[in-house]
Amino acid sequence: MTQHRKSQSIGLLVTVVFSAVLLWALAAMVWPAPVVYANEPPTDISLSNSSVAENEPISTTVGTFSTTDPDPGDSHTYSFAIGLGDDDNDSFTIVSDTLKTAETFDYETKNTYNIRAQSDDGNGGTYTKPFTITVTDVNDPPVANDDPYSVNEGDVLTVTAPAGVLANDIDDVIGLLDLRDCCLVESAGHRPFTIYYFLFTILYALSRTC
């Protein structure tokens, strides 16, 4: 009976010691840390085109944004950002990834616009960048304005140019026009004529080719 109890005690002691050693060994082991995904923010934004012609209607497409991102699976949304180069954000809109005009531009009034855009990867990463949008010139047609004159019947009316007929006519390329820039398209010809009516009209065209 005593021998049996001793065997049980020894067995229990061995079990306790073994369990303690096993727990110590397990505690001492270095287990690999769980892999945690770390989002990397975008590193650059590009715009496919950065110029637009003057006189184009509102909502004209300027270009398309794209993003450089170390995480290839990220998708990006675009918006305007506040900061250096945001002076003309209100002159444009962003629809999805496309930059569009929010007004009709006039090259002669202003031909460069500054915006600041932001790309957001949806996982906390953003990148902002300024862009300069250039307005390109389009050849506008010359503008001819009316010139009223009066003369008594039977008298000779002499109108000098450019101080007379062309003084208020202008072309965006040439500037103020002179006789070398126009031609008569309907008149009594280039000779003196007699006035028989109270009201008459002389038409002339502003052109560098006629």
Image (cartoon, helix red, strand yellow):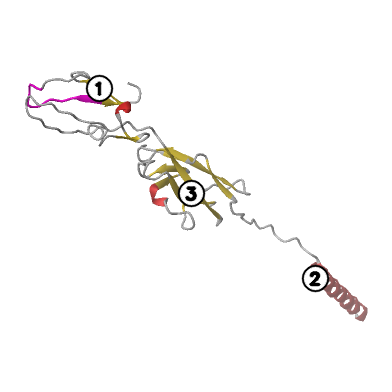
Residue at label 3?
A: 78
Seen from the viewer's position, the closer of residues 33 and 210 is 210
Q: Where residue 155 appears, x then y in whole percent?
A: 9, 26
**Magenta span contains residue 145:** no
Q: Where residue 83 appears, x then y in whole percent?
A: 48, 58
Q: Is residue 158 above or below residue 58?
A: above
Element type at marker 1?
strand
Q: Residue at x 52, y 48 (%)?
A: 76
Mark 1 surroundings within 10 Å by alpha-carbon count, few (fewer than 14), some (14 through 19), many (20 or more): some
Seen from the viewer's position, the closer of residues 94 and 135 is 135
Please tell me in which quadrant of the rendered image residue 34 appears.
bottom right
Chain part drawn in magenta: 195-204
- Per the model, the C-alpha gap separating discs 1 and 3 is 55 Å
Of the 4 image quadrants, the one containing the N terminus is: bottom right
Element type at marker 2?
helix
Seen from the viewer's position, the closer of residues 158 and 61 is 158
Image position of 27 (left or right of 56): right
Instruction: Tell which tag, 1 or 2, sits nearer the viewer.
Output: 1
Q: Which numbered disc covers residue 184? A: 1
- Per the model, the C-alpha gap separating discs 1 and 2 is 109 Å
Q: Where residue 112 appears, x then y in whole percent?
A: 44, 46
Q: Amino acid at mark 1?
A: Leu
Instruction: Tell which tag, 1 or 3, sits nearer the viewer.
Output: 1
Q: Residue at x 42, y 42 (%)?
A: 100
Image position of 27 (left or right of 173): right
Residue at label 2?
A: 23
Please tell me in which quadrant of the rendered image residue 204 appears.
top left
